Image: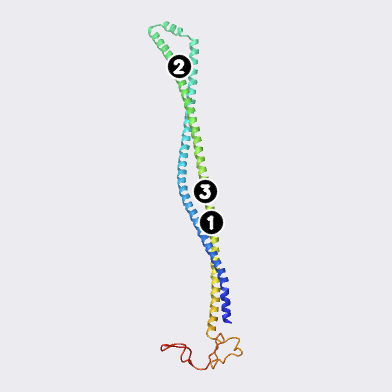
Amino acid sequence: MALAVFLSLALAQPARAETLSETRRKREAARQKQAQVAARLDELQASDAELESAVGVLSGQVKAQEASAEAAGQAVRAAVAAVTEAEGRLAATRKRLGDLRQAVVGRAVSAYMRPQEEGITEVMQAKDLGEASRRRTLLNQVNNTDRNVMDQLRSVGQDLALQQAQLEKARKLAEDRRRAEQTKLGDLVRARQEQQRLAAALDERIRNFQSEADTVAQQEAGLSTLIRTKEAEVAAQVAAAQAAAASAQAGLPSRAGPRAGAPDPGADGRVSGSGLAWPLRGPLTSPFGYRWGRLHAGIDI
């Protein structure tokens, strides 16, 4: 019966071994997938390092753009200050021009009311040469003043035209610098947004692959535990079968007892698993085999 148990276990072994092999194949596939995921994760981390390098370069460019934008802002402020100063000069020149025009108008009215002949007549009507000289000097001063006022009027008019042109140029420069500043600031904002978008997308991909790697690792651990359990069960069954076979071969008494018609087992009562027994009682003195150059075909009791 022990031999039958051993044979039944031996026949059942291939089916259980096949299931165990399948489980091992699944574990190997899980390990391969885990390695693939880890490799992809390494690639992503390498891409992350490359991105970090690119981000570092971009950060340097951003700092340069910030410095450039700050310089542009300073240039705008300087241009605005120049515009304000030019407007102040232009206002002062316009006021001076107005004053000179009023002076010219006043001199014109005075000349109309008192023509130059009257001045000459007054000189000629002087009582002496000294008074005539003083009157002549005053008349020359008036004439010089009139000419000076006219020269100043022309000069101030020229200054006014020049300052107006400078003011328009300063205003245009300030406006151009404002547009350049806005463009640089816009580029800076877009670069920062792109940097943040790429970094966020990469972080999300890394988290997803890390989660997948953790799941595969859990599956591999579960399969390994299942394999160890199955191996332990098979080992226990094989050990039990081997123990039963060893007991049968050692000639342990059969549970069914002696069969009817079996030969006398002798005094010790030992019977083999095949129903064989010693023909006679007594000790074995010579076994089967070659003896002194010839075959001893039997046993001696």
Question: Given this view, does label 2 or label 1 mark the residue nearer the observer?
Answer: 1
- In this rendering, is residue 48 above or below 216? above
Name the residue at 57% across, 76% down: 9
For label 2, count other residues whose C-alpha is less than 10 Å away and answer few (under 14), some (14-19) or many (20+).
some
**Percent x, y of residue 32:** 51, 61
**Mark 2, secondary structure of its residue:** helix
Name the residue at 40% across, 10% down: 136
**Mark 3, secondary structure of its residue:** helix
Location of mark 1 (residue): 209
- In this rendering, is residue 228 above or below 99? below
Location of mark 2 (residue): 150
For label 3, count other residues whose C-alpha is less than 10 Å away and answer few (under 14), some (14-19) or many (20+).
some
Question: Given this view, does label 3 or label 1 mark the residue nearer the observer?
Answer: 1
Q: Amino acid at mark 2?
A: Met
Sequence order check, earlier mark of 2 and 1: 2
CA separation in Å, label 2 and label 1: 89 Å
Location of mark 3 (residue): 198
CA separation in Å, label 3 and label 2: 72 Å
Name the residue at 58% across, 79% down: 5
- Which of the 4 quarters of the picture holds residue 258? bottom right
Sequence order check, earlier mark of 3 and 2: 2
Question: Given this view, does label 3 or label 2 mark the residue nearer the observer?
Answer: 3
CA separation in Å, label 3 and label 1: 17 Å
Given residues 284 and 232, the one toward you in this image is: 284
Given residues 82 and 6, the one toward you in this image is: 6
